[in-house]
Image (cartoon, helix red, strand yellow):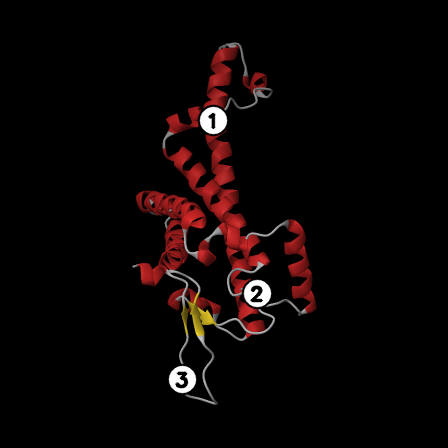
């Protein structure tokens, strides 16, 4: 297991015009399981959203568990899995995006700055989607939230209800409707981010002449060359 998780170099020669480029282990097995597990869980959750609520909820719990694992693994995992290895500041990320537009971005063995920013955005969106879904699953869980603004409550008042009844009713119905809206917005944002992520992967694969989706299956990438960043 230790050997599987190690980021040791695995060079080999192959057929062709001279020696095939050496390969190195970049993505450990747990990173790969997380990646494809999230893809599967999100796909199941999306397809069952209006059809099979029980499966939808199970998929949501799976997403939450995977995100929790990734946050932990980002602190104690293998080299290229750790947040400290790939998270960059806004200036570095913007500079990399500028280089991408100009077509001169450098190849990163692990996550590049744009990919790192996307990972943060995806983890936040996944967390928010899972959390709002969890709150919606049981009405009593909404009570855990801070008090919602009550400024509109008097508009629902009439002669047969005192202010306390109106506020209580509004908080219950309004909170559920608001949560549903937020959950749907986050789910749609997740799809948009996923599409941008796929587009970035395709672009990087084309620019740097390597199959990045395959690398997330095998764990191996072409060894760093001159000008590449490890």
Determine which of the numbered discs, if any, sits on residue 145 in the image.
Answer: 1
Residue 184, image x, y percentages: 49, 43
Labels 2 & 1 near each other (Cβ < 8 A): no
Give above or below for 121 relative to 206.
above
User: Which quadrant is home to the N terminus?
Assistant: bottom left
Mark 3 secondary-structure assignment:
loop
Give above or below for 205 relative to 125.
below
Front in this rendered view, residue 125 or 165: 125
Mark 2 secondary-structure assignment:
loop
Front in this rendered view, residue 46 or 202: 202
Marked residue nearer the N-terminal end (2 or 1): 1
Marker count (numbered): 3
Which mark lies nearer to you, 3 or 1? Answer: 3
Give above or below for 151 relative to 119.
above
Residue 154, image x, y percentages: 58, 16
> Could you give the CA–CA distance between mark 3 and mark 1, rounded to whole angstroms?
59 Å
The part of the image, by quadrant, that contains residue 215 is bottom left
Residue shown at 67% from the left, 52% from the top: 91
**What residue does disc 2 label?**
229
Residue shown at 60% from the left, 20% from the top: 151
């Amino acid at each position: 297991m230790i050997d599987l998780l190690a980021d040791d170099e695995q060079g080999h020669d192959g057929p062709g015009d001279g020696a095939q480029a050496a390969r190195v282990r970049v993505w450990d097995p747990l990173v790969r399981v997380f990646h494809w597990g999230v893809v599967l869980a999100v796909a199941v959750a999306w397809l069952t959203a209006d059809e099979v609520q029980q499966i939808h909820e199970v998929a949501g719990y799976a997403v939450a568990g995977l995100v929790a694992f990734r946050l932990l693994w980002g602190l104690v995992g293998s080299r290229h899995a750790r947040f400290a290895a790939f998270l960059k500041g806004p200036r570095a990320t913007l500079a990399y995006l500028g280089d991408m537009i100009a077509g001169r971005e450098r190849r990163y063995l692990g996550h590049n700055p744009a990919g790192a920013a996307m990972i943060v955005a995806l983890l936040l969106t996944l967390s928010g989607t899972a959390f709002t879904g969890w709150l919606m699953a049981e009405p009593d869980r909404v009570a855990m939230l801070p008090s919602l603004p009550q400024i509109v409550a008097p508009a629902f008042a009439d002669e047969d209800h005192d202010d306390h009844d109106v506020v209580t009713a509004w908080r219950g119905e309004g909170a559920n409707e608001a949560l549903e809206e937020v959950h749907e917005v986050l789910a749609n944002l997740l799809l948009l981010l996923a599409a941008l992520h796929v587009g970035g992967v395709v672009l990087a694969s084309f620019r740097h002449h390597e199959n990045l989706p395959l690398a997330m299956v095998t764990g191996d990438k072409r060894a760093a060359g001159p000008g590449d960043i490890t």
